Image (cartoon, rainbow, N blue to C red):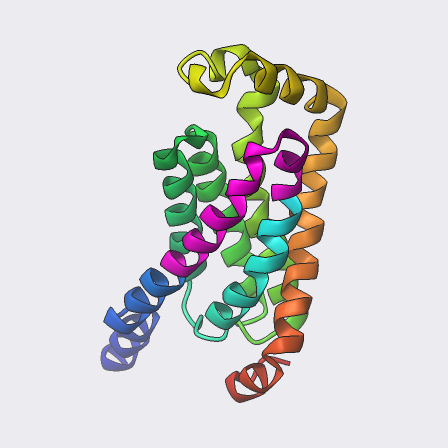
Amino acid sequence: MDGVTNQRKSEEKLGGKDLINIGIYAAIYCVIMTSISMLGFIPIMMPMLAVLCPLIGGITMMLFYTKVKKFGMITIITVIIGAFLWITGMGYWPFIFGIVCGSVADLVAKSGNYLSKKKTVLSHGIMNITIFGCFLPLYLDINGYFATRTSFGSEYVKALSDIFKPWTAPIILLCSFIFGIFGALLGMSFLKKHFEKAGIV
């Protein structure tokens, strides 16, 4: 009995292959986000990051989800993404959101034994709320946020101040979630054979 229990615990632990998959897909996703974030230099395109990152990144993340069979993989990759955003100057909020959203997204996917398309879609939507963390400093203290980023110029700061009014916060948050859903559906349509092979129905 103890042998069976130990075997189950061993199977539930993340192995080297799992960590390699996390690293590979995290790197790809971060490159995609970095490429898309270049559009943020155009003020009006800044809020669009909450749409484009979840949508375009959905294809990569859905391929990652076909590799997920153990709890912790979704949590770790989301935390890595949040940490990357923090390191690249988006503040610490994405990291905090990454911990919370990653854990919840992992639990949702696990509730479907990582084999439910509906749970996978919902999980990806929740995971992408992490992106909202990038925008939070713009709502809390935009002048303080740009105090150490003087190279952007006062006109850029003013343009963002006009765009990121307090009432837009729930819209940006909702967009991160909804387009995370759309991104998952888009990814699934592109990767239909991979999902069938992984037994996700």
Residue 152, x across and y down, in percent: 49, 21
Q: Main secondary structure of the magenta part?
A: helix
**In the image: residue 169, left or right of residue 131:** right
- Residue drawn at 65 percent across, 37 percent down: 45
Give the answer, above or below, for where 165 lies relative to 182: above
Residue 141 visible? The answer is no
Image position of 24 with respect to 93: above or below? below
Residue at the spot x=36%, y=57% of the render? 27
On screen, residue 115 above or below 55? below
Q: Quadrant of the N terminus?
A: bottom left
Residue situated in front as seen by the camera: 161 or 179: 161
Q: Residue 73 lies in magenta, yes or no?
A: no
Question: On screen, 161 above or below 180?
Answer: above
**Residue at left 56%, top 16%?**
142
Quadrant in the picture for residue 200? bottom right
- For the residue pair 129 and 35, the one nearer the viewer reads as 35
The residue range painted magenta reads 26-49
Residue 32 in sight in this render: yes
Magenta segment includes 46? yes
Residue 92: percent from left, percent from top = 41, 29
